[in-house]
Image (tube, helix red, strand yellow):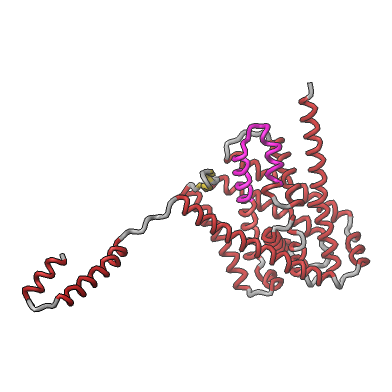
Amino acid sequence: MQAKNGDAATAIDGTASSHEQSASSHGKAASGPDRQDRSVPVAPPTTREREEAGERRRRRLSIIGTLVSAAIFLASFVVLWRILSDLSLEELTTAFSSASRRQILLAILFTVISYSLLTGYDYVALKQLKERIAYRVTAFASFTSYAVSFTLGFPLVTAGTVRYWIYSPHGVKAAKIASLTVIAGITFWLGMSAVLSWSLVRHADQISFLANTRLSLTQLVGVLGFAALAAYFIWVALMNPAVTVRGWRLELPGVKLSLIQMLIGAGDVCAAAGVLFVLLPGGHGLSYETFLAVYVVACMLGIASHAPGGLGVFEATILIALAHLPTSGVLGALLLFRLLYYLAPFMLALAMLGVYEARKRLRRRP
């Protein structure tokens, strides 16, 4: 191409100097590599490069999540400390012991209902995974795993270990136990979302007053919650979705099982909230549905903090939302709630696991 251009230039102007020719050829030679660099296609990233990029993103998100959790945890403890600094031990003791026998019996009843519904989490998950396990085994594994993880925290480790301990002798593999944990988590969040959306729409005026927000904003959040639930059900109905993580594939429950999940999760949340609601001091003037929204938000913030049982964060949220009530009375109810809903089931679960392990060892003996 350069030769043809040179011939044309000679035919037009035969007096072109050699200096101009060398400069022209030098300029063309200099522009050649640039033109060549621009035309070379960029190689697509390899599988390893994509995995490394994904790992870096996950690390960044993990760091951000940890910082957010720590910020929620520390801020809640600062608020809790300021609230408790004005409270005497005598007032707290009086409030703790002022609960009537009727209140305590109702709280125990709601605790039993809540943990009974928690067994449905595992039942639905095992049904989705096509594992046939006797309900007594499912109920035992579910109760003990939740009772332990609620108190110790780190549910993927604590609850997963207890479940593997109980389910593995019945032929359930570790991968399916991990899938069970994911499906149970979906059950919980479907129930929480349904309860919160219902409360925000039905009692938006009271919740707006407690949260110091506009009525329209509260109603909008409730409507968006219902819209998100509807979108999820449409998604599972039309797409038959599955989650794949590093070769591990989990098919999500369909519409029928998802509806059962939502009802079980909502029932569990309502019963757990009922434990604390019946322990509150009289004359609070709150409707149960309004208190449900307060309870669900407190639970969500407690989960985000990654504190065992949302300790500190849950209490601070409840105390802020119920600031119009006597602080000592609300704190006494919270302490009783921790005792009845967390500590008592935890101690019972440890005793049941001890008996279970002792029976296993006795059976192994000749």
Question: Mostly what secondary structure, the magenta segment?
Answer: helix
Give the residue at the far right of this rendering: 90
| Residue 88 seen by the camera | yes
Residue 324 at x, y = what percent?
A: 79, 72
In the depicted view, which residue is nearer to us: 305 or 286? 305
- Rendering quarter of residue 11: bottom left
Q: Is residue 336 above or below residue 286?
A: above
| Residue 292 seen by the camera | no
Is residue 171 covered in magenta? yes
| Range covered by the magenta-colored residues | 158-187
Q: Is residue 95 left or right of residue 213?
A: right
Give the residue at the far top of this rendering: 366
Tell me what residue is drawn at x 93 percent, y 66 percent: 90
The N terminus lies in which quarter of the figure? Answer: bottom left
In the depicted view, which residue is nearer to us: 362 or 98? 362
Q: Is residue 73 left or right of residue 108?
A: left
In the depicted view, which residue is nearer to us: 82 or 318? 82
- Rendering quarter of residue 56: bottom right
The C terminus lies in which quarter of the figure? Answer: top right
Q: Is residue 212 above or below residue 105?
A: below
Is residue 132 covered in magenta? no
- Rendering quarter of residue 356: top right
Residue 101 at x, y = what percent?
A: 89, 54
Q: Is residue 111 above or below residue 282?
A: above
Tell me what residue is drawn at x 47 percent, y 54 percent: 50
Q: Is residue 331 above or below residue 48?
A: below
Residue 220 at x, y = what percent?
A: 58, 68
Tally of marks: 0
Residue 131 at x, y = what percent?
A: 60, 35
Tell me what residue is drawn at x 80 percent, y 39 percent: 352
Q: Is residue 38 left or right of residue 139?
A: left
